Image (cartoon, helix red, strand yellow):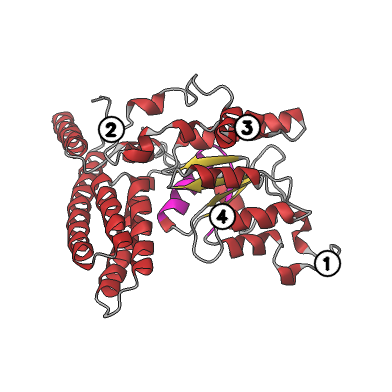
Amino acid sequence: MDSNTVVSWPRMSENIDGFGLSPKKSDEVHVLAVDDSLVDRKVIEHLLKVLACKVTAVDSGLRALQLLGLLDDQKIPSETNDFVGLKVDLIITDYCMPGMTGYELLKKIKESSTFKETPVVIMSSENVLPRIDRCLEEGAEDFIVKPVKLSDVKRLKDYMTTKEVRGESQGREGIHKRKLLDTSDVSSSSSPPSISSSSLPSAPSVIDSPTRRLKMASTD
Amino acid sequence: MQNMEVDQMQRQYLDYIKSLFLEGFLDGQFLQLQQLQDENNPDFVVEVVSLFFEDSERLLNDLTFALDQKGIDFKKVDAHVHQLKGSSSSIGAQRVKNCCIAFRNFCEEQNIDECLSCLQQVKQEYCHVKNKLETLIRLEQQIVAAGGSIPTMEFSF
């Protein structure tokens, strides 16, 4: 039972490097996680690591932009720009943050030439349809309602792997917005323990075309 | 002999954690976190819970201060409660989270008395869950120290 002697933590040693400027394995997904909550950062970081993603977690939109080299004072010619080599495969950000919101961060990312193709996922504790709409319209790939579960992150990873395999950027059709329709989360504060749900597949059959459903709702 | 001890401890642990769920102190999100703990990250739950304690205590202090002011800035109070709601939700501290939901409503109404009452309530609920979690972790550590493994809960209700 004592197998404590040899524990290989390849992911850990790469992370010590800090901001991912070291060459990453080509199949390893690098995720930039942005959340002002210490607890949530810890949770999301771990969720992603469990799925073998390399994670860089920062506490603000400003930090994220700094890391991505997108702050106004960082607009220097690419020859001298250290950040040109930074590979980020996914950015996952909280919506409600002091200073810069996740939405504002999303906009800045989508306006950039370097990272506009990078998928951005928004997390929020509030299941507010107009908010979700706005984010999706601004180019967010997906929207996760907190608290974040392993199944949420798994879904994202599957999406990313598929994208890489296909070698093309997916449109929004493939988005699972299961959480949108999970109205039981919205109203009831006494949600039953989701013990059984963690073992179920994450996408209920009701949602076949979430994007269309969303569009229909907004044109009514 | 040791096996019997471990069995007992495991039973005690299971009974305890079940009660926490039945009494609404914890919800499914806590189980999610437990499921994420493995040999590579054996202290994950303890780490997150510790962060939650730190974070909550800071927020409760901030709330006390904010509600003690002559001119209460309800936006600020709401922001703190929102944060506490978020972190308690993320670790599955259901009662604390529910307190925060009610608290936010009163912030919106700018009802000072109710807000003060909510603050007391949330402090109490926080103390309760803190004790419970500390006990739970202690039970886990006892089991591991005795050479046993922490049993996983498998029941639905």
Give the residue at the far top of this rendering: A205
Q: Which mark is residue A102?
A: 4
Mark 3 or 2, nearer chain start: 3
Q: Chain of mark 3?
A: A
Mark 4 or 1, nearer chain start: 1
| Disc 3 element | helix
Image coordinates of residue A142 in percent, x first then y, are 58, 39
Mark 4 or 2, nearer chain start: 4
> Where A12 falls versus B119 (above or below)?
above
Q: Residues within 10 Å of mark 1 (few under 14, many from 20)?
A: few
Q: Chain of mark 2?
A: A
The residue where tag 3 is placed is A159
The answer for how far apart the CA atoms under marks 3 and 4 are is: 21 Å
| Disc 4 element | helix
Amino acid tagged 2: Pro
Q: Are marks 3 and 2 on the same chain?
A: yes
Q: Which mark is residue A192?
A: 2
Q: Which mark is residue A80?
A: 1
> Where B135 falls versus A166 (above or below)?
below
Q: Within the image, what quadrant is residue A156 found in?
A: top right
Amino acid tagged 4: Gly
Which region of the structure is painted magenta?
A: A39-58
Residue A44: say if magenta: yes
> Where A76 falls versus A13 (above or below)?
below
The answer for how far apart the CA atoms under marks 3 and 2 are is: 29 Å
Comparing B130 with A126, the one in front is A126
Q: Are marks 4 and 1 on the same chain?
A: yes
Indicate the quadrant containing the C terminus of chain B: top left, top right, bottom left or bottom right: top left
Magenta span: chief secondary structure = helix
Q: Within the image, what quadrant is residue B22 found in?
A: top left
